[in-house]
Image (tube, rainbow, N blue to C red):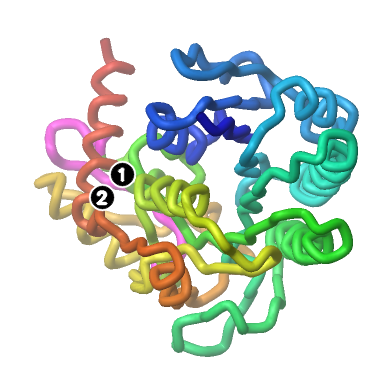
Amino acid sequence: MQKVLITGAGGFVGKYLISCLEKEYFLIAVTHSDEYAYHLTNGLSFNLDIKNEKLIYDSLLKYSSDVIVHLAARSMTWDCSPEDYFNVNFLGTFNLYQAVAKFKEASSINPKIIYVSSAQIYGDVDTKVAIDENFPINPVNFYGSSKAAGDILSYQYSRSHNLKIIIVRAFNHIGPGQKKGFLVSDIASQIAEVKNNEGNIRVGNLKSTRDYLDVRDVALGYKKIIEKRDLNWGEAFNLCSGVDYSGKQILDKLISFSLKNITVTTDPNKVRKKDIPTIVGNNNKFKSTFSWKPLISIDESLKDILKFWENQTLLDNL
């Protein structure tokens, strides 16, 4: 049975990836805090600082992982310092690759690595054409810059150290359990908290369009990469739905699913200073290479998210 090490296993995607893999792989779930540790029947979990190369190296020697899914990152939020983005997203990735290179030399084991990049590396794309992997990298925020740096570093290590790295440029993913701070969860949580079927919610910019993919389809995509042989190391793939929706469209759908009478107010504090107008990806390369396609529709995903927040609201009111 293959061993799969997952960094950032305690995050939004990590939980779904563990659920997707746990029956077929021995999982090593690495989290940044004991608070997020798992009790796995087919694996183990421990916390580790991704910025500590020696700890990463010692863990690789101890558990000899066949595959590494590198999810650990500071996600796209607006209360994160530039230093945090680069210390975790870039230097954490650098430390991981340094440790893997030393591990490969010491053990002759060269694990497959999935580096999770981001659509934010493409930046402010002045086109409505779906972005493919050949589009230039032009990030416009610190998160995108840190991910772009890791993206380029991944390609370099695949060449300079012969590491078996696949780069996945993940577009916006959504699903039940995603924290507040992201548009869909913010809207759904507010709707769920409205009492007596009538109330007001506050939103930011709803004109921007995004390519949304359900987190369960994201996890399945990573599983497909793990299963695939004969890949070109250092190659990049977009993981996305290929369809974009505006914030207004998302809002209207969620309100219609709630059956509540909702009024909407624009909150200046929720309007980002720099918001990319539109991002939609071309997923043809990923679909053809990994025999993958999205299985969960946007409506199904939004209904599940709204149900999650309704249940959360009930628990909070007990």
- Magenta stretch: residue 134 in it? no
What's the residue type where badge 1 is placed?
Ala
Residue highlighted by disc 2: 302
| Residue 193 painted magenta | yes
- Seen at 77% across and 24% down, the residue is 59
Q: Residue at x 48, y 15 (%)?
A: 40
Q: CA distance from mark 1 to mark 2?
A: 8 Å
Q: Which residues are magenta?
A: 192-206
* 134, above or below 151, in the image: below
**Left or right, residue 69 beside residue 243:** right
Residue 308: image x %, image y %?
Answer: 28, 33
The residue sitting at 51% across, 89% down in the picture is 127
| Location of residue 97 in the rendering, given as x and y in whole percent from the top left corner | 82, 46
Tell me if 92 is positioned left or right of 312 in this view. Answer: right
Q: Residues within 10 Å of mark 1 (few under 14, many from 20)?
A: many
The residue under label 1 is 188
Q: Nearer the viewer, mark 1 or mark 2?
A: 2
First-in-chain label (1 vs 2): 1
Label 1 with label 2: CB-CB less than 8 Å? yes
Residue 156, image quadrant: bottom right
Q: Amino acid at mark 2?
A: Leu
With respect to residue 227, does 154 lie above or below?
below
Residue 283 percent coordinates (x, y)? 43, 72
